[in-house]
Image: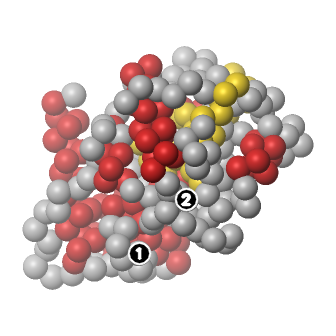
Amino acid sequence: MTEPPPVDAPSPNHEPRPAGRCADTLILHYTGMASGETALARLRDPAAKVSAHYLIETDGTVYALVPEGRRAWHAGVSAWGGACDINDRSIGIELVNPGHDLGYRPFPEPQMAALIALGRAIRARHPIPSHRVLGHSDVAPQRKLDPGELFNWERLAAHGLGVVPVPAPPPAELPAVAWFRDQLAAVGYAVPGGNGCDSATRNVLAAFQRHFRREDVTGTRDSQTAARLLGLRRQLEARAAVA
């Protein structure tokens, strides 16, 4: 796939990245608005104070809003792998989709094809490991659901944009909440302090499932989630060992 030529649609909503900081993360969003036109207008509105580097319409048209070397305002309050303020180190792509509140639906083929081509080109330009292609809900699980359980992460991973966990044998008994919290933190999620399986922990569990166990997003612990969590952790540790 070749990178689709973008339509230049500059947004004023950006600023320099911190000195010495490069993009090592790619964050995918859905617009959550009634139309692409409305979303594009908001991302270019100085009063809105939001933006992304790119927006992809349902027909595959790519709009370039913010230069990749600049800090766009797309992730908000966010964290991953112990680092906060993911805007500092990420490139953000918005996918036109009305989202959970306005008629959430699958992402059409032209849009997915354009995303894969664009994502591969971005990875070629920046030191973004495949496992740091993430959803907004991964880095902001207490606030966000996008791109959601209808997004085909497996297809992206087949093109080097993400990872698919190879499930490990699950523990003989369902692990305690503390085990799930430890595993989630080990693979990158920000897990707030708390007691037991509180609402914040359930939100992080649901974010993991929304990305890595899309067919059954419950926010509760179960053996299948344990197996995929453990498998993902082992895959990431193996990659780190040979890096």
The answer to whether residue 142 is visible is: no
Amino acid on which disc 2 is placed? Asp
Residue nearer the viewer, 196 or 211: 211
Could you tell me residue 58's position as x and y percent? 58, 49
Amino acid on which disc 1 is placed? Val
Query: Looking at the image, do the residues carrying marks 2 and 1 touch, with CB atoms under 8 Å apart?
Result: no
Residue in the image at 17% along x and 34% along y: 241
Residue in the image at 56% along x and 24% along y: 5
Q: Secondary structure at mark 2?
A: loop
Against 43, residue 104 (above or below) is below
Q: Which residue is mark 1?
A: 217
Q: Earlier in the sequence, mark 2 or mark 1?
A: 2
Quadrant of the image containing the C terminus: top left
Q: Which residue is mark 2?
A: 146
Residue nearer the viewer, 159 or 190: 159
Quadrant of the image containing the N terminus: top left
Residue nearer the viewer, 51 or 195: 51
What is the C-alpha distance between the residues marked 2 and 1?
Answer: 13 Å
